[in-house]
Amino acid sequence: MRGRSVSPVFVGREEELAALSESFDEARKGTVTSVLLGGEAGVGKTRLVQRFAEQCQAGGAHVLFGGCVELSTEGLAYAPFTAALRQLVREQGPAAVAGLLPDGAERDLARLLPEFGEPSGDGETDTGRARLFEQFLTLLERLAAVRPTVLVIEDIHWADRSSRDLIAFLSRNLHAPQVLILMTYRSDDLHRQHPLRPVLAELGRVNGVHRLDLPRLSRDEVAQQMAGILGVVPEYAKVQKVYESSEGIPLFVEAMLEGGEDCTFPESLQDLILNSVERLPEETQRVLRVAAAGGIRVSHKLLAAVSGLSDVELETALRPAIAGNVLQIADNRAYVFRHSLIREAVHDELLPGEHQRLHARFAEEISKDRGLVPPGRAAVELAHHWYGARNDTWALISAWEAAQKSFKAFAYTEAVPLLERVLMLWDRVPDAPELIGADHTAVLERASEAANSGGDVDKGAKFVKAALSQLDESKEPVRVAQLIVRRAAFKNSKGQLGVIEDLRHALRLVPEDGLDRGDVVTVLSRHLMLRGEIAEANELIAEGLHLVREHGDRCLEADLLMNRALGHSLNGEIESTIALNEQALAIGTAEGSGRLITRAIGNNIDALIDMGRHEEALRLAQHGWKLAKKYGRLRGSGLFIKNNWAEVLESLGRWDEAIEIIEGALSHGPVLRNRYTMLRTRADIALARGEVQLVEGILSEVGVLKDRPEEFVQDIISNARLHIGWHLLRGEPGAALAVAERVLAHPQSSKAMLSWRLLALLRVVCDATEAIEPDRAATVREHAAEVAAELSVIGPVAEAYRLSYSGDFDAAAAAWERLNRPHNQSKALLRAAAASARGGDREGAAARLKVALPLAQALRATPLIEEIEALSRRVGGVQPAQEPSELLTPRELEVLRLVTQGRTNRDIAAELFISAKTVSVHVSNILGKLGVTTRGEAAAAAHRLSLLSS
């Protein structure tokens, strides 16, 4: 006898279900954010997810469901998140959902659901996408604050680019307890070029993201599944036949049993999947073919309209499919195929003419009544169906419309393929410009804008190149200039040369009295500053300020003020730098421009670092990061702020925290130039800890080892400094000297701190090579002295580096101590000790080394520790056993105090305003330094040694 087509028994997934439950328990503590559940098509991912969701709901959790559909890859942006949001609105109402968000934030969600009113209409649309991401993050966090929350997203192998980006963003940034994102994907669909592969690789490196693979069923598990379906224990031979044929894929087991008692295996996989369909009445099969053309989910009204059947006729035709579990009823009177493989197989059976005719019918009905599809989906559905209908004219028109809708939803990456379709169809539609109200070049310009906003630099550059080839700069100079400025931005993002040349060309094209010139002057003057051409930049800034003030453009005025501030910073005039940035900040605040606000804050953090005002810089960085999130500027000014934050932590010796900040920033996918800046900060720490291979990898990526040319003076100096440090770490002083010779041949930055830092390192190189290359070392010293003579000394940081360069190491050590920079202090003490030893003062050398060693040990600065210990042995200053308290930094003592109180890492993180990961690093260091293995032993040692007596 044949029973049901789906087993009522949950078979063979106990281990995976337990793993999901464990992940959810960890998520409730805030240590797990996401689970990626992979498996072949038909292996049972949906069934496992359903069972897990039922368990979560029984335990009081709130489960939201969102699924990706195959149409998503053609532009259905944020499909799973829109579905989950729609469920939430149905459950709680729009007002309650809006109440979970900051004031006005629901207007961002209105771009996805009309229930939230009119979308926001601010001019800074490039910020909207990032702001939309923040609203989803906030929404999940606030839902989880009420009760445990699970967001299920199925079939992310079909996710659109925007959904993939949002998935990655949430997985990296969702740290609130009581929330878990569970995602499923087809592992057998991931070919080498599949867009999900890099996302999975990236998420695999994110803490708190678990990956779970769902295997096929074993023979015994297939027997259990068959027994559940058939209602009787199957014969051994039948089990063996089904197992060998299905290879343990549950969907195939079901399909074979649908074939009757013989369990015959169809000649092809297509036949196997279609078996249950072909047993249905012919009229039912015809309607299923219509439904398959509509997608995995089709509303009753739309299916009735396309099929031409009345409600009663449609229900009669579909009833056998529903009874046979081929089709299922979803919410809002919609039908969904039980498995996407079934829909694909049915769709693939369509004849060519039938395929075009059905897609045309769907397009026609949706055109008549857009309410036949969920809100916000009509444009992209029309683009999909008109293209499937091979109607070039309407395919072009609908793709253009869908692209404009994507812009409004900040789904720039979905707009790109739609605009590419417009371009592909252009020559087939004679009156295309009149139909969409734009010429071919305008489509290319729009595509380059979408690519730029979506971070696709390579594709954006191709669009710009194509657009420029169609324009005559003598006839449309302003339009050409705007494209050239965008091309320069793409070049800058890729670290390519020719940016200044492009911008000069653009400047020659724009009228001298218009705001278009102000736009170009603003960008050009900033790049000139960064190249060290300060005088020319200042002339342009003066011209630009006069022009934009005359036209009343306050935002451009603020940008130009910050460009002027950059020049003051490079000249070492830090106080005036801060004042100019504050002026720009005031304008940005008055204009409500998040871009200006975050740029001004980022610039002032950099200025405070140069002044040695580290605590102020830290506070401003934390505040600036919050504002960057608020204004949707995470990947722009936000990452600049993050890098400055890491630089402060690096200088203060809080290296593990700095690494965490850098890794978090890199996970946001910064443009190439910003990525290189972050990697340089990471390389500084790696050099100090002796991580040779890591340094080599970074230098190779940044292009230092390939002598890739750089335009910006700051990059040239930073690269040279790291290159020299790498050679010294490898014991290659001669090679380090060669790099020193090359960098001195370049124009030096007038930024005092940068140049004094380099000069201090050049002294180390010359001291190390004096015996083997006396003439070359002497020449480098002479050139360095010439540079030093031209440099100003403004601020305590530049002064400390100057003292190190001049050889006054004791004074330098004292200066670094005042600045609370332990690594620099320890290095200066080592140099002072070496000088004392050469002068015969061995006791003085030993005393300095005794202070230097614990500083280096606390930082785990291995090369410095080895140098200190080697010199200590040479001067006979055998180090006495250190008191445990000398080996613990103040921060570690704070952590130890809380450990003795029985606090968890999460509690300590909240108390000290650091992350739980950083606390874990501190605890590991404490255990190692005290020679214990558990927190209890550490607490006992603290009391025994009176470490916390104060």
Image (cartoon, helix red, strand yellow):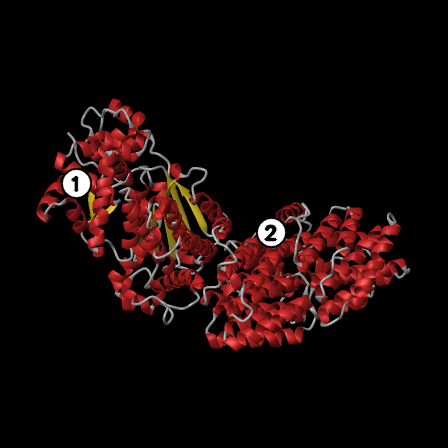
Where residue 644 sits: x, y (%)? 60, 63
**Up/down of 260 relative to 41, above or below:** above
Identity, as a three-letter code, of the amino acid under mark 2: Gln
First of labels 2, 1 by sequence position: 1
Q: Residues within 10 Å of mark 2 (few under 14, many from 20)?
A: some
Mark number for residue 588?
A: none
User: Element under label 2?
Assistant: loop
Observer-nearest of 422 and 32: 422
Where residue 444 sits: x, y (%)? 44, 52
Residue reaching furthest right?
A: 840
**Up/down of 632 relative to 333, above or below:** below
Q: Residue at x 10, y 43 (%)?
A: 316
**Front of the two marks 2 and 1:** 2
Q: Which residue is mark 2?
A: 496
**Picture quarter containing residue 711?**
bottom right
User: Element under label 1?
Assistant: helix
Quarter the N terminus occupies: top left
**Picture quarter containing residue 4?**
top left
Observer-nearest of 853 and 450: 450
**Picture quarter containing residue 169?**
bottom left
Q: Residue at x 34, y 41 (%)?
A: 14
Residue reaching furthest left?
A: 312
Q: Which residue is mark 1?
A: 287
Identity, as a three-letter code, of the amino acid under mark 1: Val
Observer-nearest of 183 and 130: 130
**Up/down of 366 relative to 611, above or below:** above
Q: Is residue 372 left or right of residue 591?
A: left
Quarter the C terminus occupies: bottom right
Observer-nearest of 352 and 742: 352
Report if residue 156 is visible in the image: no
